[in-house]
Image (spheres, rainbow, N blue to C red):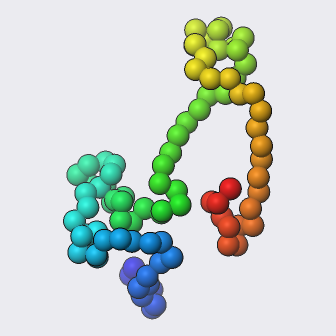
């Protein structure tokens, strides 16, 4: 990284391939100019999703067919210092 005095030589994620093998991986998004690959994405946040949560009545008003029903939920908080993204 330009302007950074200290070079990062390893992270705490387990990599089973060699640096040469990782360098050959193609971008996952915005091909062919993307920069996110399986080698440089966070091993803790390797995915994405979206969900529309509404009442059944509102879904019917919008002409939508529910695919699931939320019956219960649980909220868990983690200490962001060393447990971020583990909830």
Relative to 73, residue 61 above or below: above
* Residue 31 or residue 26, whichever sits in front: 26
Which residue is most to the front?
Answer: 16
Quadrant in which residue 87 is drawn: bottom right
| Residue 3 in view in this figure | no
* Residue 57 or residue 69, whichever sits in front: 69
| Residue 44 in view in this figure | yes
Residue at image coords 43%, 82%? 10
Q: Quadrant of the N terminus?
A: bottom left
Residue at image coords 61%, 28%? 52
Residue 61 on image: x %, y %: 65, 8
* Residue 77 or residue 59, whichever sits in front: 77
Tell whether 16 sits left or right of 80: left
Residue 4 on image: x %, y %: 45, 86
Residue at image coords 24%, 70%? 21
* Residue 46 or residue 14, whichever sits in front: 14
Tell whether 13 sits left or right of 22: right
Residue 5 on image: x %, y %: 45, 91
Tell whether 32 sits left or right of 39: left
Quadrant in which residue 35 is drawn: bottom left
Relative to 82, residue 38 above or below: above
**How many marks can you see?**
0
Residue at image coords 39%, 66%? 40
Relative to 71, residue 37 above or below: below
Residue 68 on image: x %, y %: 62, 23
Which residue is most to the bottom?
Answer: 5
């Amino acid at each position: 990284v330009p302007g950074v005095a200290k070079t990062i030589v390893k992270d705490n994620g387990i990599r089973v391939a060699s640096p040469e093998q990782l360098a050959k991986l193609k971008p996952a998004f915005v091909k062919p100019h993307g920069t996110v690959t399986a080698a440089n994405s966070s091993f803790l946040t390797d995915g994405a999703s979206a969900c529309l949560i509404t009442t059944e009545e509102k879904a019917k008003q919008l002409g939508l067919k529910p695919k699931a029903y939320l019956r219960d939920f649980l909220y868990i908080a983690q200490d962001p210092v060393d447990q971020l993204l583990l909830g």
